[in-house]
Image (cartoon, helix red, strand yellow):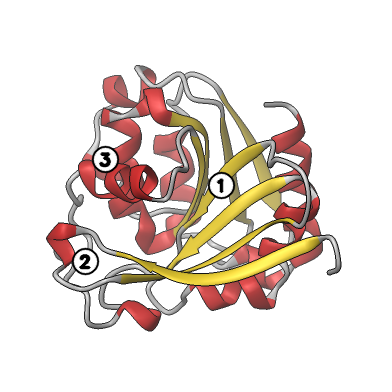
Amino acid sequence: MSGVRMTEGSVQVEICKAPLFYRQSEPASGDAKMSVLLLHGIRFSSENWLNIGTLETLAEAGCRAVAIDLPELGRSKSAKAPAAVGEPAPAGFLKEICEQLSLIPTVVISPSLSGMYSLPFLMEHQAVIRAYIPIAPICTDKFTTEQFQSVKVPTLIVYGDQDAQLGEQSLRNLSNLANHRVVVMKGAGHPCYLDDPDTWHKALTDFLKTL
């Protein structure tokens, strides 16, 4: 990990009333090629991306990666969520985070619960999103086929083939995105990146090389 610098911090988003915790990784020397924002599911936090090596992998690939703890979860428990679970959050929420942390344009990695944050952001602010990597996100049913078709952001749809519910539902809706490719992780469940980090990291880094 000698070529990687890891830091922790917090960012204040007005709507949350309390700071959001984040972990950051970046190459120890030289400029980062791109910025990546990592979100997480309801039972998880930024710590998962640290533990399975995604933060390190991204920094080694020349990226600056920021993994935040979403409001009311992880180490951001005292922050107020801007929407109820399962309801789309204001699109400006992630935009404000990206602006404050100088992540624009950003690649957004969005599993499960975090779809309530990433999808409104994608629909309204695609100009500041370099790429989108949804992993069986919720809330895909809250948007129309036409809305998905209007998004031109390069997208890597990832899901585990054992995730029969959210994986398949989200794929059906996300497949309407104009510029997408799909990676199905064999034998993996809903948090497929946890089940098979090696396959996840290869799919991730291969996709980032195409941007």
Q: Quadrant of residue 173?
A: top left
| Type of amino acid under label 2 | Val
| Mark nearer the N terminus (2 vs 1) | 1
Q: How far apart are labels 2 and 3 at the CA level? A: 14 Å
At x 19%, y 67%, the residue is 81
Label 3 Cα neighbours within 10 Å, binned few <14 / some 14-19 / many ≥20: many
In the image, which disc is placed on residue 36? Answer: 1
Gap in Å between the C-alphas at discs 1 and 3? 18 Å
Of tags 1 and 3, the one toward the viewer is 1
Find out whether the residues at labels 2 and 1 contact each other: C-beta distance under 8 Å: no
Label 1 Cα neighbours within 10 Å, binned few <14 / some 14-19 / many ≥20: many
Q: Is residue 79 above or below residue 178?
A: below
Which residue lies under the disc numbered 2?
85
Q: Is residue 10 above or below residue 51?
A: above
Instruction: Tell me the SS state at disc 2.
Output: loop
Q: Badge 2: how crowded within 10 Å, few (<14), some, or many (20+)?
A: some
Decide if residue 153 is on the left or right side of residue 162: left
Is 209 rendered above or below residue 101?
Answer: above
Image point (22%, 60%), residue name: 86
Instruction: Give percent across and percent down for residue 171.
Output: 48, 42
* Image coords of residue 132 (percent x, y): 51, 38
Would you name the residue on which mark 3 appears?
A: 120
Tag 3 or tag 2, which sits nearer the N-term? 2
Rendered residue at 43%/57% (across/down): 166
Please identify the quadrant where the N terminus is shown.
bottom right
Q: Quadrant of residue 13?
A: bottom left
User: Which corner quadrant of the image does residue 32 belong to?
Assistant: top right
Q: Position of residue 193 (x, y in %)?
A: 65, 64
Q: Position of residue 107 (x, y in %)?
A: 53, 40
